[in-house]
Amino acid sequence: MIEIQNLTKRFDKVVAVDNISLSIPEGSVLGLVGSNGSGKSTLLRVLSGVYQPDNGEVTINSAPLFDNPAVKGECYFVPDFPFFYNNSTINNVAFLYRNLYPNWDENQFVHYCTLFPIDTNAKIINMSKGMQRQAALILALSTCPKYLFLDEIFDGLDPVVRQMLKKIIVDHVAEYNLTVVIASHNLRELEDLCDRVCLMHKGKVLIEREIDSLKTGLRKVQVAFTEVPDVPNMFDGINIVNIQRNGNVFNITIRGTEKEFLPKLNALKPAYISALPLTLEEIFISEMGAAGYDTNNIV
Amino acid sequence: MTQTTSSKNKLKSAFSLFKWELKYCSGTLAVYAILAAVFIIVVLTLTLLTNILNTNSDYSDVVNMAGYAGNLLQDTGKANVPIVAFQFISSQIIYYLTIVFTIIYTIRVFSYLHNKRKADLYGSMPIGRISMYFTRCITALAFTLIPALFFLGIISIVSLCFGQPLINETSMIYLRLIMGSVACISAYGLLAICCGTTLNTVFMFIITCIAYPVSTMFINSIIKSFFIGFYNDFLSNSFFKDALNPLAAYNGRNIVYWIVFSIICICAGALLIKRRKFEYAQSSFAIFLPCHIVKILISFLVGIFLGCLFGSLNVFGYGYLGFLFGFVLGSVPAFVISHLIFYKGFEKLIKSSIMLAGLIVVVSAFIAVCNFDPFGYNNFIPKVDDVKSAGYINLNSVYNKNNDRIDKLAKNAAGDFEDNESISEIIVGYNAYCNYVKTGSSDKFSSIWPNFILSAVDLANTDNMDYCFAYKLNNGKIVTRVYSAKIYDYYPSMDSLLYNITSSKTYIEKYSAIMNADAASLENFVIEPLYNSNYTESSFAIKKSKKEGTENADEDKEKIIEALRKDIEADLGKDLAESKKLYSADIYSEDEYYNAKNTVVCLISVSIPKESLQNDLSFGLFYPTNQIFYDNSEDYFIPLSYKNTIRVLKEIGVLCEDNTANKSCPYKQDSNSDVIYESGVTSGKIYY
């Protein structure tokens, strides 16, 4: 289990990660989502031991992570822009990783090299962005990590490879109890893959919970009236996250279940009412809006 | 449960990283190998070809440069000389090539600290930061030394195939490369940790290597110019001169200092790498202290240059004011420009300017003390009554038996002469020099420049013109002055003013090679009979040669030295001094000349090859100073009263019974002899 306690990371005066605490259970896939500059990549770098926390602590199975090769040997970090030397090929990077990572599996390496459509002797630096990601993934998966940290991994991958990657991760989680933390703005992909999601903004965690509970906790409700009731604060008693009015039609994001809010809405005698679960993207936008980060505030 | 890594795993990881770096440096290594191989082949071909085409060509210049005595030509036969030349030239090429590639490898291996993407890669790897740092140091060192050893080995094998063993210089080159590489890699590694970019690291390294030694040379020159006769051995002849210039470690001097320097750099690096944050990659600096030091160093150097220039040009009609103006004019822009380069903007400029202000105040105060001489250093001239004992040394021709530093020699000399006559003579000489310096140097700032140029010259390889005066005062205080005459066009002749001192038995016993050096090191030992003759008809070199009868040359030389020492010790009437005087040009007269011809039996000239006085490597914190025996020849005009010497010379057959030359002696040199003479020793020299 990854334990993050009161973690703070500063860059001069900028607080990139601000006193966050988080537990990531074994075998879970945590999606890190958030606004630009919310601290997702910084958190991943702290988790992978690149950055040292200014305050707080990150432990994996109670062992400190920073500058601890034994723990880091079980982790692998694929950054948003993986570094490769000018003459690096997948084969010669594997040459280093073979002795460096204790769980390196040659069979897995051969397997993934055949699975991904990539030339293992070609210079990685000359490959497209997506191919470079694939190269990084082949190497990452061949080290058989127990903890995999991925930053914007879907960026540049074609839909087939994206689908394949998701399948591989899910299989690894099921088979090897792999723990994955993925930072991404591609919420559609995360929705398919993650069992938990952590929403970050300005270095703080706004929400961290299981994706199902997050989805069931919020409803997108459309309420239409023939004539809008002349009742002051007519939605009082309903936990509204966001509300938009378009004539006699209200689009409301409500926190809670149908059982909780439908009786109250029906009491207003609407002409039409429908309640749907939110997509992750909609959850993101509504929660960020609640945190003061919405288009109305920005533009 | 705390997870740890075993030492074995650490080594395994480090070795993997080493192999990985090796793979990525293979291109650079290949370039090095190709260049080295081509140069070796070219040099070998040229030296062999030159030897075949021109059998008369000698390589004495190269051989002498190699520190290999000129007698190699005699001893080993001419066939080996081209190989010695090959060995020397090619090893020098490998030496410089290795230095260049060391810097390239070092920049490369530490670049992982200066790139955010590399930081992601290496920072997340399962290898400790200290292990990573040490692996990098060792990698750079191995990339440097293993190929160099390989090519120096090839040079040695090629030489051996031609029957020439390894000369001293070639083996020393490898030791110098080790020392230089260790110092440079550890220093660069430390700077790389402190800097956020490779550009800043390279700038800092280059600036430190240049600015620091030049700054110490300026300080040295200022002290020498303002406090005339002050011997600052510490600044000019010690580790301090190049203390922050790791490239100087390639000289092989002050090995102890460079070992300590490297250990400090490596330990500081290991300490700082634990604390250095990877996020500083691509920032200006991770640790600002070296940046401040370098900024101050640059400001000081540019300021002192313009200050000394304006001071010597008497800007504002007074040297000190000119200096201050020049110093501010130089240091302020230098500080601002270096700040802009390192910080890439004006950020923190005002705050860090406090250091510049401090520098200006300190330097102004220091130059004020130098300029106004509040302690009266330059006005000191002792009275005979105040002096208990005194001494004088002509540092041109002193044999430094115990390898003492000049300041120690000077202090010891203070007790040499206790009689009033000698003390007076020494004070007269000292006074003459002081008066000359005072009238000859109109502006002390002007003499900074010649002193600065002299500081730049490697004193070990130049002829010196230094004189030392020392006094032990009645109050027990010892006062010493060491003057260098090199910066003046003309200076008083100490030889004539202090003739009685330098030709005295006390002086010869203490400072001459004949009395202090062992016989083996007196390689050039030439005797020129003079008795009853107006020129030297023949000369005798006491040396083994192909001639029959020279087999016992070493024993014969020792016999002569022993006899001469006995005679000098028993010379109560100063006969040796008198006989030298008779042949001294400036007191020459016809009557005296004819008198000399019947009182002086022969001239014995001894010398020590300069090369044997120079060490390739030196330990400790100071350079070896036995090189102060520059004028490496001593002439002894043997008077008739030197019975022991004359008897031995007759026994070995150099002199006949009537004290004339024995022309059938096997030591007699032919007029077209191949013997290489050191400076100051000539054959068939005519004394008219």
Image (cartoon, grey):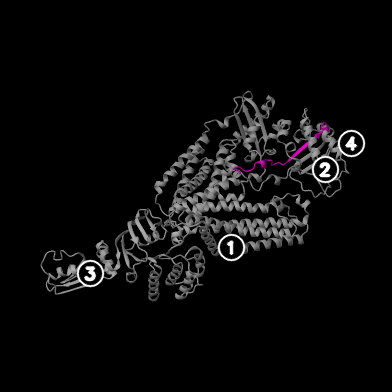
Q: Which mark is residue B29?
A: 1
Question: Which mark lies nearer to you, 2 or 1?
Answer: 1
Query: Does the CB distance between marks 4 and 2 fall below 8 Å?
Result: no
How far, Cα to Cα, is label 4 from label 1? 71 Å
Q: Nearer the viewer, residue B295 or B273?
A: B273
Q: How many marks?
A: 4
How far, Cα to Cα, is label 4 from label 2? 17 Å
Q: Do the residues indicated by labels 1 and 3 lie within the same chain of the protein?
A: no
Q: Quadrant of the C terminus of chain B?
A: top right
Sooner in the amino-acid sequence: mark 4 or mark 1: 1
Is residue A299 among what the camera can see? no
Q: Do the residues indicated by labels 4 and 2 lie within the same chain of the protein?
A: yes
Is A199 left, or right, of B679 in this rendering?
Answer: left
Query: Does the CB distance between marks 1 and 3 fall below 8 Å?
Result: no
Is A263 left, or right, of B5 in this rendering?
Answer: left
Residue at mark 3: chain? A
Is B576 left, or right, of B243 in this rendering?
Answer: right
Sooner in the amino-acid sequence: mark 2 or mark 1: 1
Q: Which mark is residue B539?
A: 2
Question: Which mark lies nearer to you, 3 or 4?
Answer: 3
Query: Does the CB distance between marks 3 and 4 fall below 8 Å?
Result: no
Q: Which residues are magenta?
A: B620-643
